[in-house]
Amino acid sequence: MRIIHTMLRVKDLDASLGFYCDVLGMTLLRKKDYPSGEFTLAFVGYGEESEQCVIELTHNWGVDNYDLGNAFGHIALGVDDIYGACDRIKQRGGKVIREPGPMKHGATVIAFVEDPNGYKIELIQTKTLVD
């Protein structure tokens, strides 16, 4: 078994695709409208679905707001250079809501960004940076 995807409901599919593809650098892998159900599914990721876990963006037609609740935490992405990644995200119009730095109760360097729907994405430094 393996994790295939995580699904997020989005209010504006174009804005969400812009964030995940243009700001975070993912690729739109596939997109399909389901007129009888009045929804569209778009799958984005850093590699093919057969090899990588991806994100399913679900847009329910006519729904322009969701209550995110307090149970969902975040999606985490590993990055080689967290400071450079945050700079690029800001340059591309993304919103960094926690600047890079050590986590509160540890040494792992993390940052958080927010997508157009309010979902949190944690960036985790995966390589040791050398000056």
Image (cartoon, rainbow, N blue to C red):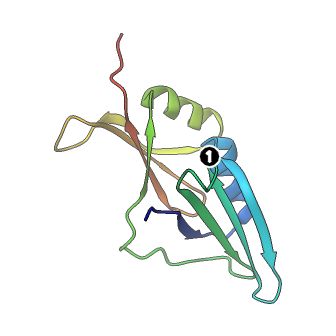
The residue positioned farthest toward the left in the image shown: 105
- Residue drawn at (58%, 64%) of the image: 117
- Residue drawn at (65%, 37%) of the image: 92
Quarter of the figure with the C terminus:
top left
Residue 82 image offset from top left, x and y in percent: 43, 31
The answer to whether 58 is drawn above or below residue 102 in the figure is: below
Decide which of 118, 108 is in the foreground and name it.
Answer: 108
Numbered disc 1: secondary structure: loop
Residue 74 image offset from top left, x and y in percent: 41, 59
Q: Amino acid at mark 1?
A: Gly
Q: Which residue is mark 1?
A: 47
**Residue 112 left/right relative to 59:** left
Residue 69 lies in quadrant: bottom left
Residue 54 image offset from top left, x and y in percent: 57, 57
Decide which of 124, 101 is in the foreground and name it.
Answer: 124
The residue positioned farthest toward the top in the image shown: 131
- Number of numbered tags placed on the structure image: 1
- Residue drawn at (76%, 64%) of the image: 31
Q: Mark 1 Cα within 10 Å, few/some/many (few <14, many 20+)? A: some
Q: Is residue 24 visible?
A: yes
The answer to whether 17 is drawn above or below residue 10 in the figure is: above
Residue 106 lies in quadrant: top left
